[in-house]
Image (cartoon, helix red, strand yellow):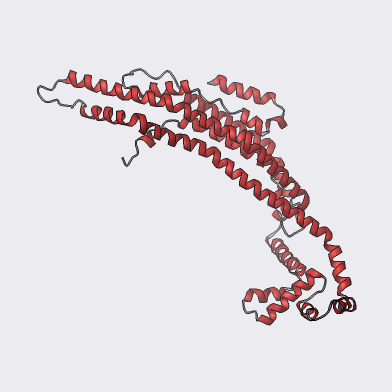
Amino acid sequence: MKKIIITLFALAMMLPTKAQMTPEAVMGMTPDLPSTAALLNYWKERNDPLRDEAPDSYILDEFREAWNAANDQIQDMQAKTLAPGMQRNAMAGKVAGTNKTAGEVANMSEAEAKALAMSTMQGRLSSMGLSQADFAKLQSSNLSDEEAMAMASKVMAKQTGGLTAKDIEAMSHMTDEERAAFMQESGLGESMTAKMNADKGKRASSQKQYQLVTELTSLGQKELSLQQKAIGMIESARKEGVALFDRKYRKADERFRAEIAANQIPEKPEPGFDVEAALARLRAAESGWFNNMSRFYAEYIPMYRDAVAGAMDCCRAQLLPVKRQHKEVMENLYALTQSAEYALSDSIPFEASSMYFELSEKITEFELEDELYPVNE
């Protein structure tokens, strides 16, 4: 076992720091899954009723030890190489609606934070053409229809460069020539054109941000689907194992277990009780049960191991590329917005390698006793 840990440590030391912290490197540190033969032998040695000596195989204990050692090393590597950069990016990102970074906000006093919140709210209201008094009226829930219409008109005027609901109502009764004249004489044509030109860059930026956020949502759905697919492979294998047992092995299992129960040797046998004959029947029933279960596990273990390996491969071959696209989109959003919300893109691909690593531990859960013999049976 020490050899496995020393080998993992030596490999990690040979890698440069940046190479260590890649999803592929994390996946590469995952211990190899035990073979189907090793798993079957492990089960047999621990369940053979006629075996008196201690098991020779400790394959799952060795796997867990190697897995825990790798996990500790991965966590240490992340803390030393990945986390500091992510923290710097997060602290450098802008807090939504402000021109302050997350680091600056984190170092503010309570009074400064309240002042920033008030200033941010006022800025948002101003961008909508509303005052703090208008906001107070909105919160009061006592707004009349006229006041609501007036506020809507303010917002429209701010967004369009001066056009109000009253102007729209007036122009609805005009001819095309009259509308053109009204727009020119009132100055609305010039002010609205100026507003459109001023907002052109903002609209392009907003459109790009919308496209990126939409793409991020789509990628999130793909990621969830692939994660469910990977987990579903293992869950399906367990269900198929129970179905296999019910179909081919349960009837014999029930018969042997009934025989085992019927041939238990009492602590104080009645006179004339043939202990040797009962013991022979008990041993035969136990041997029959063991052989039946061994055949079952010989058929089931390859199914389960393939499912675990397939789930891990799904993370490597399918989930990781999508996570890398997710990272790229987040980087583009950060470049566009400087928002702290998009500052942690470096961690995204590692979500695939973390799942890969964690799923490998499922190999230690290959036994099906809980499903084959439910507690409420």
Q: Is residue 185 left or right of residue 53?
A: right
Residue 194 sits in quarter: bottom right
Task: Residue at 64% x, 22% y: name it.
Answer: 10
Which residue is most to the left? Answer: 271
Q: Is residue 75 visible?
A: no
Q: Is residue 353 left or right of residue 330?
A: left
Residue 290 sits in quarter: top left
The residue closer to the viewer here, 302 or 116, is 302
The residue closer to the viewer here, 59 or 187, is 187
Task: Residue at 27% x, 27% y: name it.
Answer: 256
Q: Is residue 178 left or right of residue 259?
A: right
**Quadrant of the image for the C terminus?**
top left
Give the number of callouts: 0
- Residue 322 point in image, percent of width and height: 66, 40
- Residue 350 point in image, percent of width and height: 64, 38
Q: Is residue 187 left or right of residue 30?
A: right
The residue closer to the viewer here, 331 or 245, is 245
- Residue 159 point in image, percent of width and height: 78, 69
Task: Residue at 36% x, 24% y: name it.
Answer: 47
Image: 181 above or below 235: below
Q: Is residue 267 visible?
A: yes
- Residue 169 point in image, percent of width and height: 76, 80
